[in-house]
Protein backbone atom coordinates (compact mmCIF):
# COMPACT_ATOMS: atom_id res chain seq x y z
CA UNK A 1 0.00 0.00 0.00
CA UNK A 2 1.10 3.54 -0.69
CA UNK A 3 -0.20 6.93 0.46
CA UNK A 4 0.58 9.97 -1.68
CA UNK A 5 -0.08 13.54 -0.59
CA UNK A 6 0.15 16.42 -3.05
CA UNK A 7 0.05 19.90 -1.57
CA UNK A 8 -1.85 22.63 -3.40
CA UNK A 9 0.36 24.69 -5.71
CA UNK A 10 -0.66 28.21 -6.79
CA UNK A 11 0.82 27.51 -10.24
CA UNK A 12 0.41 23.77 -11.02
CA UNK A 13 2.46 24.17 -14.21
CA UNK A 14 5.55 24.53 -11.99
CA UNK A 15 5.36 21.01 -10.57
CA UNK A 16 4.15 17.52 -11.38
CA UNK A 17 2.82 15.21 -8.68
CA UNK A 18 4.05 11.96 -10.24
CA UNK A 19 5.66 11.65 -13.67
CA UNK A 20 3.98 9.60 -16.41
CA UNK A 21 4.36 5.86 -15.87
CA UNK A 22 2.69 2.46 -15.99
CA UNK A 23 2.61 0.51 -12.75
CA UNK A 24 5.02 -2.44 -12.58
CA UNK A 25 2.52 -4.73 -10.86
CA UNK A 26 -0.62 -6.57 -12.04
CA UNK A 27 -3.37 -4.30 -10.70
CA UNK A 28 -3.49 -1.07 -8.68
CA UNK A 29 -6.62 -0.08 -6.77
CA UNK A 30 -6.72 3.64 -5.98
CA UNK A 31 -8.90 5.76 -3.72
CA UNK A 32 -8.55 9.52 -3.30
CA UNK A 33 -10.04 12.39 -1.32
CA UNK A 34 -12.10 13.72 -4.24
CA UNK A 35 -9.59 16.31 -5.43
CA UNK A 36 -8.80 15.93 -9.13
CA UNK A 37 -5.25 15.15 -10.11
CA UNK A 38 -5.08 11.68 -11.65
CA UNK A 39 -4.75 11.76 -15.42
CA UNK A 40 -4.61 8.90 -17.93
CA UNK A 41 -2.95 8.95 -21.33
CA UNK A 42 -5.50 8.61 -24.09
CA UNK A 43 -4.41 6.11 -26.70
CA UNK A 44 -4.28 7.33 -30.26
CA UNK A 45 -7.20 5.73 -32.08
CA UNK A 46 -7.36 4.49 -35.62
CA UNK A 47 -8.28 7.13 -38.14
CA UNK A 48 -7.15 9.98 -35.95
CA UNK A 49 -4.93 12.64 -37.40
CA UNK A 50 -1.36 13.38 -36.36
CA UNK A 51 -2.35 15.99 -33.77
CA UNK A 52 -5.27 14.07 -32.29
CA UNK A 53 -5.30 11.50 -29.51
CA UNK A 54 -2.51 10.49 -27.21
CA UNK A 55 -3.15 13.40 -24.83
CA UNK A 56 -3.93 13.40 -21.12
CA UNK A 57 -7.47 13.18 -19.78
CA UNK A 58 -8.66 13.78 -16.22
CA UNK A 59 -9.85 10.72 -14.33
CA UNK A 60 -12.97 11.92 -12.52
CA UNK A 61 -14.50 9.04 -10.56
CA UNK A 62 -17.75 9.46 -8.61
CA UNK A 63 -17.25 10.22 -4.88
CA UNK A 64 -16.15 7.12 -2.96
CA UNK A 65 -15.38 5.13 -6.11
CA UNK A 66 -12.24 3.04 -6.55
CA UNK A 67 -10.07 3.47 -9.64
CA UNK A 68 -8.45 0.31 -11.05
CA UNK A 69 -5.26 0.54 -13.15
CA UNK A 70 -3.85 -2.45 -14.98
CA UNK A 71 -0.07 -2.72 -14.75
CA UNK A 72 2.69 -4.18 -16.91
CA UNK A 73 2.20 -7.72 -15.57
CA UNK A 74 -1.42 -7.74 -16.76
CA UNK A 75 -0.19 -6.77 -20.22
CA UNK A 76 2.33 -9.63 -20.23
CA UNK A 77 -0.05 -12.27 -18.87
CA UNK A 78 -2.75 -11.34 -21.43
CA UNK A 79 -0.17 -11.32 -24.27
CA UNK A 80 -0.90 -7.66 -24.93
CA UNK A 81 -4.70 -7.95 -25.00
CA UNK A 82 -4.96 -5.70 -21.93
CA UNK A 83 -2.54 -2.78 -22.03
CA UNK A 84 -0.97 -1.28 -18.95
CA UNK A 85 -2.56 2.10 -18.31
CA UNK A 86 -0.13 5.00 -18.49
CA UNK A 87 -1.02 7.70 -15.98
CA UNK A 88 0.36 10.60 -13.96
CA UNK A 89 -0.67 12.81 -11.05
CA UNK A 90 -0.82 16.58 -11.31
CA UNK A 91 -1.22 19.15 -8.56
CA UNK A 92 -4.18 21.44 -7.95
CA UNK A 93 -4.08 25.20 -7.43
CA UNK A 94 -6.97 25.08 -4.94
CA UNK A 95 -6.69 22.01 -2.73
CA UNK A 96 -4.34 19.31 -1.51
CA UNK A 97 -4.88 15.80 -2.88
CA UNK A 98 -4.32 12.56 -1.00
CA UNK A 99 -4.56 9.13 -2.56
CA UNK A 100 -4.26 5.61 -1.20
CA UNK A 101 -3.08 2.87 -3.56
CA UNK A 102 -3.14 -0.88 -3.00
CA UNK A 103 -0.99 -3.00 -5.32
CA UNK A 104 -1.54 -6.58 -6.44
CA UNK A 105 1.78 -8.06 -7.51
CA UNK A 106 3.45 -11.45 -7.83
CA UNK A 107 6.18 -12.66 -5.48
CA UNK A 108 9.66 -11.55 -6.59
CA UNK A 109 10.63 -15.07 -7.70
CA UNK A 110 7.40 -15.71 -9.61
CA UNK A 111 7.85 -16.46 -13.32
CA UNK A 112 5.61 -14.20 -15.43
CA UNK A 113 4.63 -15.19 -18.98
CA UNK A 114 1.59 -15.04 -21.26
CA UNK A 115 -1.11 -17.30 -19.80
CA UNK A 116 -1.73 -20.48 -21.83
CA UNK A 117 -5.52 -20.07 -21.58
CA UNK A 118 -5.32 -16.58 -23.06
CA UNK A 119 -3.01 -17.31 -25.99
CA UNK A 120 -4.68 -19.06 -28.93
CA UNK A 121 -3.00 -22.09 -30.47
CA UNK A 122 -0.39 -20.94 -32.98
CA UNK A 123 -0.48 -17.34 -31.74
CA UNK A 124 2.93 -15.72 -31.25
CA UNK A 125 3.93 -14.89 -27.69
CA UNK A 126 4.61 -11.16 -27.45
CA UNK A 127 6.59 -11.46 -24.21
CA UNK A 128 9.25 -13.88 -23.02
CA UNK A 129 9.13 -15.48 -19.58
CA UNK A 130 10.88 -13.59 -16.77
CA UNK A 131 10.84 -13.36 -13.00
CA UNK A 132 9.07 -10.45 -11.38
CA UNK A 133 12.37 -9.58 -9.66
CA UNK A 134 14.04 -9.23 -13.08
CA UNK A 135 11.18 -7.02 -14.21
CA UNK A 136 11.42 -4.76 -11.16
CA UNK A 137 15.17 -4.33 -11.73
CA UNK A 138 14.63 -3.29 -15.36
CA UNK A 139 11.67 -1.07 -14.42
CA UNK A 140 13.74 0.73 -11.79
CA UNK A 141 16.73 1.22 -14.12
CA UNK A 142 14.46 2.56 -16.88
CA UNK A 143 12.68 4.85 -14.37
CA UNK A 144 9.34 3.41 -15.46
CA UNK A 145 9.66 4.40 -19.15
CA UNK A 146 6.97 2.22 -20.78
CA UNK A 147 8.69 1.57 -24.10
CA UNK A 148 12.14 0.99 -22.61
CA UNK A 149 10.77 -1.47 -20.05
CA UNK A 150 8.63 -3.48 -22.46
CA UNK A 151 11.41 -3.63 -25.07
CA UNK A 152 13.49 -5.72 -22.64
CA UNK A 153 10.76 -8.36 -22.35
CA UNK A 154 9.46 -8.52 -25.92
CA UNK A 155 9.77 -11.97 -27.44
CA UNK A 156 11.98 -11.58 -30.49
CA UNK A 157 11.13 -15.09 -31.69
CA UNK A 158 7.41 -14.40 -32.16
Image (cartoon, rainbow, N blue to C red):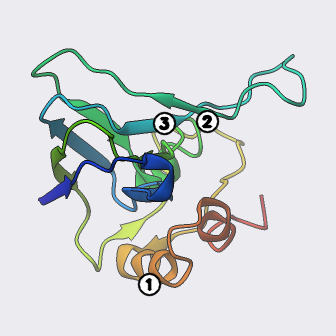
**Callout 2: helix, strand or loop?**
loop
Could you tell me if the residues under marks 1 and 2 are in contact, i.e. CB atoms within 8 Å? Answer: no
Q: Nearer the viewer, mark 1 or mark 2?
A: 1
Q: Residue at x 21, y 53 (%)?
A: 7
> Farthest residue toward the front?
10
**Callout 3: helix, strand or loop?**
strand
Residue bearing the label numbered 3: 40
Q: Estimate the x, y position of residue 20 in percent, counting from the top left.
A: 51, 55
| Label 2: how many Cα within 10 Å (few below 14, some 14–19, many 20+) | few
Q: Relative to the observer, which residue lies in front, 153 or 18?
A: 18
Q: Residue at x 56, y 78 (%)?
A: 142
Specify which label sits upstream in the sequence, 1 or 2. Answer: 2
**Callout 1: helix, strand or loop?**
helix
Could you tell me if the residues under marks 3 and 1 are in contact, i.e. CB atoms within 8 Å? Answer: no
Distance from label 3 to label 2 (Cα)? 30 Å
Q: Estimate the x, y position of residue 106 in percent, counting from the top left.
A: 26, 64
Numbered badge on residue 137: 1
Residue bearing the label numbered 2: 120
Q: Is residue 12 above or below residue 113?
A: above
Q: Residue at x 37, y 73 (%)?
A: 132
Specify which label sits upstream in the sequence, 3 or 2. Answer: 3
Which quarter of the image is occupied by the C terminus?
A: bottom right
The answer to whether residue 70 shows anywhere in this view is yes
Numbered-mark total: 3
Q: Relative to the observer, which residue lies in front, 19 or 72?
A: 19
**Quadrant in the rendering for residue 51:** top right
Q: Estimate the x, y position of residue 16 in percent, counting from the top left.
A: 43, 56
Amino acid sequence: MNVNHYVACPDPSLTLGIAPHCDPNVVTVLMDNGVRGLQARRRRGEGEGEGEGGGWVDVDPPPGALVVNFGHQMEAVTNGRVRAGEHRAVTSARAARTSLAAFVMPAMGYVVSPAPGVVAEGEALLFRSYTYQEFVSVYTAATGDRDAVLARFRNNNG
